[in-house]
């Protein structure tokens, strides 16, 4: 089995009660069967608490009225961990914020931006992210898995990542090249021309093609009505998503009011002023690059299961656009100031609401399929 991880993976360490938030509140924690069996077999004095704090029918940990896990103490430490040790934790609690995508013979493990500490690592990072591979024994087979499509997706993603980290180009141009690759690859797949997909990559390896991406990026940057319409439609959809944390509802409501109260001209003026403003603790272009790399690495190759290649690239670009909408609104709300802590909060709250709900992800993909607003 081949494993792939980002180069900052081993540097992560949970900050526990020092974290500005907790991963043990706001969402339902699903317990694996192996852990449930251990909890059923517990004979010690903690047996009663386990019986009371677990919903055995649903296989989840119960929550209090504030949606905090029943094992979460007031100091944001886990009572079960303290009473029974680290080995007592279920798979969800033991592995978070690690996220695994599985393919035939391959497991790709990322660290989720829904964790504030992971986001802090990425926001403060200057150098491009690299990905490391290692082998472990064991392999699984997947029914209906197309190894040829997967191979082309991996090759395309590799070129996307190289392109996204090419700091000789403006980051908007890199994003357009990324979207173009996904769009053209999907067109070949739809036509049943899978074995001509290599021609797409050959095209996008040519630096002479970069000028086309630059023109697309410039057109999109200048089309404020189109950007405003896409953003407003997306925020309208966001209001209908499953709500995981009340803080998100307040943040999206405030942001929507700030962004759209002045129409498309107000939206344009806000972003133009924000783009010129001084910010501290992060570099705009580098942060955009890191986010695009994160979303492409995490989701792009999942298209092997549904052939929705372009929408996974759109999700990366659309997520970054939304995050910058939130940051522009936060900057104005803060009296035209923004620092690294603001950026970290916006990103991890966005990730928590949109990446940790299958319902929300499906709705986002459906919206992006209906309107190819970021690429034409």
Image: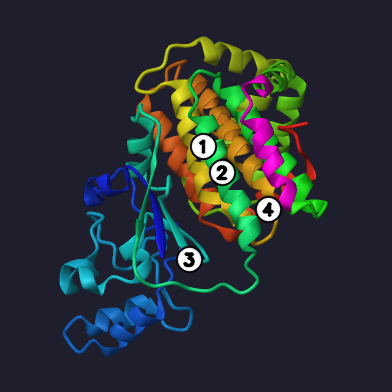
Magenta segment: 195-209
Residue at (77% x, 47% y) in the render: 188
Q: Is residue 173 above or below residue 136?
A: above
Residue 156 image position (x, y, % from top left): 60, 43
Q: Is residue 146 above or below residue 203?
A: below
Distance between mark 3 and mark 4 Cα atoms? 30 Å
Residue 220 image position (x, y, % from top left): 71, 22
Residue 157: mark = 2
Question: Earlier along the polypeptide chain: callout 3 or callout 1?
Answer: 3
Q: Are marks 4 and 2 in contact (CB under 8 Å)?
A: no
Question: Earlier along the polypeptide chain: callout 3 or callout 4?
Answer: 3
Which of label 4 and label 2 is nearer to you? 2
Q: Is residue 375 above or below residue 110?
A: above
Question: Earlier along the polypeptide chain: callout 3 or callout 2?
Answer: 3
Is residue 76 toward the left or the right of residue 219 in the image? Answer: left
The colour mode here is: rainbow
Distance between mark 3 and mark 2 Cα atoms? 18 Å
Which of label 3 and label 1 is nearer to you? 3
């Amino acid at each position: 089995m081949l494993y792939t991880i980002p180069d900052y993976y081993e540097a992560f360490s949970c900050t526990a009660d020092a974290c500005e938030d907790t991963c043990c509140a706001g969402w339902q924690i699903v317990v694996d069967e192996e852990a449930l069996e251990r909890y059923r077999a517990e004979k010690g004095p903690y047996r009663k608490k386990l019986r009371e704090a677990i919903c055995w029918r649903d296989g989840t940990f119960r929550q209090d009225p504030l949606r905090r896990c029943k094992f979460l103490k007031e100091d944001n430490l886990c009572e079960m961990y303290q009473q029974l040790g680290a080995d007592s934790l279920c798979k969800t609690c033991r592995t978070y914020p690690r996220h695994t995508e599985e393919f035939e013979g391959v497991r790709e493990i990322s660290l989720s931006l829904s964790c504030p500490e992971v986001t802090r690592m990425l926001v403060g990072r200057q150098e491009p992210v690299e990905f490391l591979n290692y082998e472990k024994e064991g392999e699984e087979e997947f029914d209906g898995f197309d190894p040829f499509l997967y191979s082309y997706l991996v090759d395309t993603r590799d070129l996307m990542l190289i392109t996204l980290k090419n700091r000789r180009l403006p980051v908007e141009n890199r994003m357009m090249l990324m979207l173009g690759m996904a769009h053209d690859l999907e067109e070949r797949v739809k036509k049943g021309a899978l074995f001509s997909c290599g021609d797409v990559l050959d095209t996008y390896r040519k630096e002479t093609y970069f000028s086309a991406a630059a023109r697309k990026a410039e057109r999109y940057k200048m089309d404020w009505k189109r950007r405003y319409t896409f953003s407003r439609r997306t925020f309208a959809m966001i209001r209908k998503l499953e709500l995981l944390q009340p803080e998100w509802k307040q943040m999206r409501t405030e942001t929507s009011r700030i962004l759209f109260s002045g129409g498309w001209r107000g939206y344009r003026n806000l972003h133009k002023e924000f783009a010129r403003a001084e910010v501290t603790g992060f570099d705009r272009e580098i942060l955009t690059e890191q986010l695009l790399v994160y979303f492409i690495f995490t989701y792009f190759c999942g298209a092997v299961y549904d052939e929705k290649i372009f929408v996974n690239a759109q999700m990366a670009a659309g997520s970054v656009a939304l995050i910058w909408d939130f940051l522009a609104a936060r900057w104005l709300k803060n009296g035209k100031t923004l620092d690294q802590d603001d950026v970290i909060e916006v990103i991890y709250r966005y990730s928590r609401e949109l990446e940790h709900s299958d319902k929300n992800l499906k709705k986002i993909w459906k919206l992006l399929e209906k309107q190819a607003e970021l690429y034409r």
